[in-house]
Amino acid sequence: MGRKSQSKQSQKKNSGKENNKLIHNRKELNVLIDKLLKLTSIFQAACNVTKSWEHHLEISEILRQITNIELGYSSKNKRSPRQANVQNYLKWLRENGAEFDGVDIAEFEGYEWGLKTVKAFNEGSLILTVPAKVMMTEKNAQESELSEFIKVDPLLQNMPNITLALVLLLEKSSQDSFWKPYIDMLPEKYATVLYFSNEELSALKPSPVFESALKLYRSIARQYAYFCNKIHTLNIPVMKKLQEIFTFDNYRWAVSTVMTRQNNIQLGNSDVTAFIPLWDMCNHEHGKITTDFNKEQDRGECYALRDFKEGEQIFIFYGSRSNADLFLHNGFVYPNNRHDSLSLTLGVSSSDPLRETRLALLTKLGLSGVTHYNLYQGENPVSPELLAFIRIFNMNQEELAKWSGSSLPSDLVSFDPTSTAAVGNTLERRSHSYLLTRCKLIRAAYNKDKEEIEPDNLHRKNVKLLKECEVQILDSAIEYLARVLKDLAEE
């Protein structure tokens, strides 16, 4: 009896120590989350790249400390390898009305998982259909236990992608979830910048995507801190569940799942954000949009982008998106992307004596507040908006007065010969010379990449490929601008 009593006392003592440790960790975590929320709420628009990077390092250090604490008290559901879940997933899809005769799931070198044909498909033929009932949408969130939280939280009301991330986390934690076979087939981690180390992020420089990546990382860190505070302060039943599963590691996984897989479809009379099982395993290839939602049959339909032979991987077209967009939100880069572009940060200096006149003219053209202009892949890399900016930026006082007097100076955004004549040869030379010099300076910043060692992981390979595509755009733009200036000199 004495030994049993001593054993019980020892168990109580150990239990008390564990509880004290959890309480201490929770307090420490709360302090760090408050710091993170304050730090990520600082407005960074006026900061330069160096300041943004220093700011990011502070954020990542706090998140490192938070993650270490969360690993100590959060429990993780062990998952079997994706390969082991394939047959159960396909069975679930068939039982719920999905049709995909002639299609299988397979691994492909350089792509991980995708869809494979087991018979030939002609271009335009129906490959697969996915009923709405198996799609996880923001409407499911509004009808779930998360609904009370959505009603009182403005962020969830205005950002359906975040709502979808939270409902995904809840469903992932439930062994009885209707979507468990789908969730079991999702990757454990992604190639998005949320999974990049600081060294991998730094390797993005001098790409303009570097700043975009820091901004995205900061935004997700702020959302995490915001929801942590909400989850531990609001008296709503679902918060108890979220407290047990809401960690930074889990949140970035859910957010990355949404970024890489979300689609907008029309259910009823409204557009909704949704996960579309099976269809979202198709990888990207240039072409045309060949997917649609059939309202009458309440299902998504995917048609063949081109002829597919038996045993080939099935591709779909993700839309006209730049590599910067694909890299940030999908975690890959598409070589020879005919829809690619490079963002240039341009603006009128606050010390420019003609600043207000220039800004007023830009406003007339709908370019008020625009600070990023695109160079495109292709024969004419200069966008109409960029053309208007370089013209207005290089106008003298007399030229500004002339164009400011025009009710709608549309010639400034036009490449038409009559518009070019209206702008005048002298201004055209100044404008294109300015842009050529700017492109050469930006291009020179990429030269140091030649000395870098060969990338040893997917993140670094994507960074290298992204910057190679950006260099191609810059080289093409430099050649184009040189030709324009040569033609102007001969006139």
Image (spheres, helix red, strand yellow):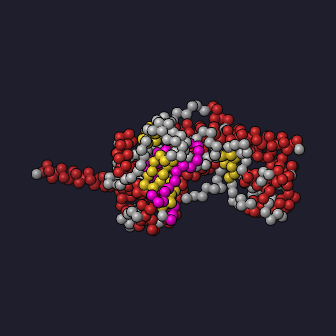
- Left or right position of 420 against 210: right
83 within the magenta span: no
Measured from the top left, where is residue 46 in percent x and y? 65, 55
| Outermost residue toward the left in this view | 1
Is residue 412 visible from the viewing direction of this image?
yes
> Quarter holding the C terminus?
top right
- Left or right position of 270 against 322: left
- Left or right position of 73 against 282: left
In this rendering, the count of numbered labels is: 0
Give the residue displayed 45% in from the left and 38% down from the top.
119
- Please identify the quarter of the rendering in which residue 113 is found: top left
| Outermost residue toward the right in this view | 491
Q: In this view, does 206 lie above or below 273?
A: above
Is residue 200 visible from the viewing direction of this image?
no
Give the residue displayed 44% in from the left and 62% down from the top.
139
Q: Which of 248 and 439 is in front in this view?
A: 439
Measured from the top left, where is residue 212 in percent x and y? 60, 50
Q: What residue span does the magenta drawing correspond to? A: 269-298
Measured from the top left, where is residue 296 in percent x and y? 47, 60
